Image (tube, grey):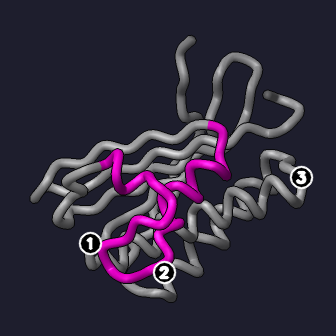
Amino acid sequence: MERATSGAQVRVFIRDESDVVVARRRARELASQQRFSEAEAEALATAVTEIARNIVVHAGGGEILFGQAVDGPRRGVVVIARDAGPGIPDIEQAMQDGFSTKHGLGFGLPGARRLVDEFGIESKTGAGTTVTLRKWAAAER
């Protein structure tokens, strides 16, 4: 089935921790507009926070695009996070709980994946990473 993004997209540039907070707030706002439960909104906001922090720590900056996700009658939020950092040489390894290249807890990417309904990641060494998240309103699943 075709998936689309409807309406205007909102772009948040991610350079530092203050931008991570802005991205988290935007995720909660969109979740509220899509009538997510409080738990669903918090899950999306937490996933966005993890991805945004990864952009700051591993890439030094990037951007996150937010939009409404549409799939037939389903409605939700789509998040596309992009950076032009060093890329992820081994995505499979990076998706394992506890793996970290910066001495963190290693729950960022795998944690974000667990918190959303759809998760995609593309990365090219030396060219950056794109992470796509989709979360659907519960009544729309």
Magenta span covers which residues?
Answer: 91-117
Residue 102 lies, with reference to residue 47, above or below; the image says below
Q: Amino acid at mark 2?
A: Asp
- The tally of labels here is 3
Q: Quadrant of residue 64?
A: bottom left
Q: Which disc is residue 59 wearing?
A: 1
| Percent coordinates x, y for residue 52 in the rendering | 47, 70
Q: Quadrant of residue 125?
A: bottom left
Between 113 and 26, the one lying in front of the other is 113
- Give the alpha-carbon distance from disc 2 to disc 1, as whole Å: 14 Å
Crowding near pointer 1: few (<14 within 10 Å), some, many (20+)?
some
User: What residue do we see at 57% from left, 63% from top?
Assistant: 48
How many residues crowd around disc 2 within 10 Å: few (fewer than 14), some, or many (20 or more)? some
Q: Nearer the viewer, residue 96 or 113?
A: 96
> Which mark is in front, 2 or 3?
3
Image quarter hosting the C terminus: top right
What residue is pinned by disc 2? 19
Q: Residue at x 74, y 26 (%)?
A: 74
Question: Does dot 1 land on a helix, a strand or a loop?
Answer: helix
x and y, in percent, of residue 55 in the image = 36, 70
Q: Residue furthest left?
A: 126
Give the residue number, with chain letter if any, for mark 3: 37
Secondary structure of the residue carrying tag 3 is: loop
- State the residue at coordinates (73%, 38%): 136
* Disc ID at residue 22: none
**Can residue 8 be seen in this snapshot?**
no
Regarding residue 60, the answer to whether it shows in the image is yes
The residue located at (36%, 78%) in the rendering is 56
